[in-house]
Image (tube, rainbow, N blue to C red):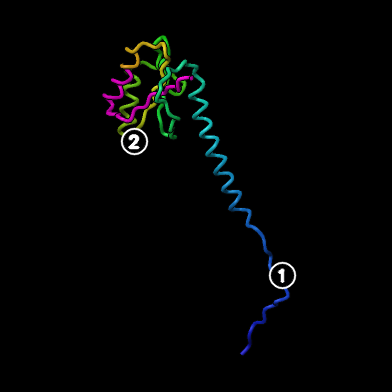
């Protein structure tokens, strides 16, 4: 019977495997770029948000729909201006595909309550109940 002899004199390579680390770095990079895009789209529309005493830091997730209402009553979603009817149709389709869809309403402090209530009605018709309002904390 013949046994293989193992050469114990060969040095084993010790080190850190780089391939999984590079994969993780790329995944983190993609995550931060996508979060940055969400915040960039939201901040591209300059609105003077109203203030509130109970304002909290936003808990924004990736799937949130951000609806901007300016002083003239123009509705903007993802840099696209649209009417209330078009918004209602889009929200209905989103609610069918993603039950529990959340919406963030960013309205200018000088915007008419009528315009904001139309957005709320569109959310109600689309059966969206997870609605957040963007406000700033009051300055001391």
Give the number of callouts: 2
Q: Residues within 10 Å of mark 1 (few under 14, many from 20)?
A: few
Point out the tag, 2 or 1, that comes first from the N-terminus: 1
- Residue 11: which disc? 1
The residue under the point 35% across, 21% down is: 87
The residue under the point 43% across, 33% down is: 59
Please name the residue that numbered disc 2 is placed on.
Answer: 98
The residue under the point 33% across, 19% down is: 119
**Real-space CA distance between mark 2 and mark 1, rounded to the nearest whole angstrom:** 56 Å
Residue at far top of view: 72
* Residue toward you, 90 or 25: 25
Q: Residues within 10 Å of mark 2 (few under 14, many from 20)?
A: few
Q: Can you give x and y, in whole percent of width and height, for residue 33 in the image?
A: 55, 35
Q: Which residues are magenta?
A: 118-140
Task: Classify residue 123 by image quadrant.
Answer: top left
Residue at far front of view: 140
Residue at far right of view: 9
- Rendered view: 136 above or below 31: above
Task: Classify residue 28 by image quadrant.
Answer: top right
Quarter placement of the N terminus: bottom right
Q: Can you give x and y, in whole percent of width and height, for residue 50 in the image?
A: 42, 17
Q: Is residue 120 magenta?
A: yes
Q: Can you give x and y, in whole percent of width and height, for residue 53 in the image?
A: 40, 22
Q: Can you give x and y, in whole percent of width and height, for residue 103 in the image?
A: 37, 28
* Residue toward you, 95 or 36: 36
């Amino acid at each position: 019977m013949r046994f293989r002899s193992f050469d114990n004199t060969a040095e084993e390579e010790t080190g850190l495997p780089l391939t999984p680390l590079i994969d993780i770095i790329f995944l983190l990079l993609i995550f931060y770029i996508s979060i940055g895009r969400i915040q960039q789209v939201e901040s591209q529309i300059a609105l003077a948000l109203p203030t509130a005493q109970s304002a909290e830091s936003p808990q924004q997730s990736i799937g949130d729909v951000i609806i901007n209402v300016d002083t003239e009553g123009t509705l903007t979603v993802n840099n696209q201006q649209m009417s209330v009817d078009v918004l209602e149709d889009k929200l209905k389709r989103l609610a069918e595909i993603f039950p529990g869809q959340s919406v963030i309403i960013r309205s200018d402090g000088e915007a008419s309550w009528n315009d904001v209530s139309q957005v709320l009605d569109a959310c109600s018709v689309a059966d969206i109940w997870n609605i957040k309002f963007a406000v700033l904390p009051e300055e001391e």
